[in-house]
Amino acid sequence: MDTVKQAIQQHVPVASLRALADGLGLLGVDRRSRRSLGTALAPIATEELLDLLDKEDLQHLALAMGRSAEGRRDALVKRILGADGTELGPIAGTFVAIDFETADNGRDSACAVALVRAEGGRITARQARLIRPPRRRFLFTHIHGITWAQVAGEPTFGEVWPTLVPLLRGVDFLAAHNASFDRSVLRACCGAAGLELPRLPWACTVKLSREQWHLHPTRLPDVCAYLGLSLNHHDAASDAEACARIMLTLQAERAAPGA
C-alpha cells in the first residue's frame, strides 16, 4: 500500500472515512471500525480518495505527513502526492487503455473488462467482455448494473484474458483512469488464474489530467465534461474508450509546436 493511502487510513477522521465509503458506494462496511473502513477503501485509487476529501481533511492529512498545510486545495494535493513520489507515467507511443468493473471489494472479482488500443494518434481496436467472477456476491451492481445472473454463464478471467492479450502486442504502455485500481485488479486476477502479468509501464490519466489541465476533481466524468467527451460511466467499454481519448488528447497537446 502506498504511503499516502496508509496516512489516509491512519490519520483522516473516522467520520470522513465514512463519508468516503458513502461517496464511493461501498456497501457492507462496518462503519464503526477504522480498520474495516480502511480495508474497504484499500482498492480505491489514492487520487480518487484525495478528490473526495474536503480541504480541512487535506490539511489534517498534510500535517500528519509532516507537510505544510498552507495554500489552495490543488497545492495541498500536489504536496501530499509528492510525499509518495508518484510519477505521471509515459505519454508518447502506442498504448492500450483498460478498464475493469468489479463485483465486490476483492481485487480478483473482475466482472467486466474493456481494452481500447491506440496507435498513430487514433484508435485502432476495441474489445469488451463480461467475466464470471470467483464469487456470486455482487456489491456494486448499483454502480455498474452488472448482476450475477448476467455473468453466471460467462467465461472466467483465466479464459477471457488470453483472448485479449493480442491487443497488447507492440504497445509501449497501458493507460487507465485511476491506474492504481485497474493495475491492482489485473495483478490479482492474473495471480488467481496463474497467468503472467503484462510487463508494461502504466500511465494514469487522473494524474496526467491534473498535471496538464489543473483539474480538480479529476474523476472520469469531470475530465470528459472538460474535454467534451461522451461517457456512460461505469460501463467498461465506455470508460476505456474515454480513457483512450483523454490520452490521445494529451499526446496531441504535448506534441503540438510550442508545447
Image (spheres, rainbow, N blue to C red):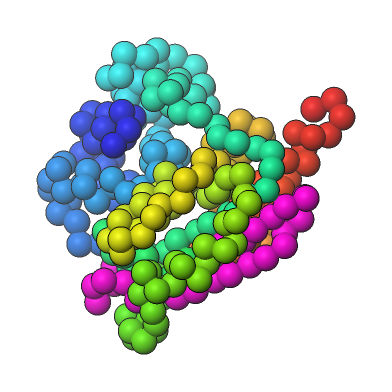
Q: Is residue 158 above or below residue 190?
A: below
Check the picture and name the quadrant holding the N terminus.
top left
Quadrant of residue 244 within the rendered picture: bottom right
- Tell which of 130 and 17 is nearer to you: 130
Q: Residue at x 34, y 30 (%)?
A: 4
User: Residue 98, position in %: x, y?
Assistant: 53, 57
- State which region is magenta: 115-142
- Tell which of 131 and 190 is nearer to you: 190
User: Residue 134, position in %: x, y?
Assistant: 26, 71
Left or right? Give the position of 106 relative to 118. Answer: left
Asked if residue 56 shows in the view, the reply is no
Asked if the stretch drawn in magenta spans residue 107, the answer is: no
- Tell which of 4 and 25 is nearer to you: 4
Looking at the rendered structure, the number of numbered marks drawn on it comes to 0
User: Residue 220, position in %: x, y?
Assistant: 55, 51
Furthest-right residue in this view: 257
Q: Is residue 200 above or below residue 7?
A: below
Left or right? Give the position of 107 relative to 224. Answer: left
Asked if the stretch drawn in magenta spans residue 134, the answer is: yes
Q: Residue at x 39, y 82 (%)?
A: 154
User: Residue 97, position in %: x, y?
Assistant: 58, 54
Quadrant of residue 151 within the rendered picture: bottom left
Asked if residue 48 shows in the view, the reply is yes
Check the picture and name the quadrant holding the C terminus.
top right
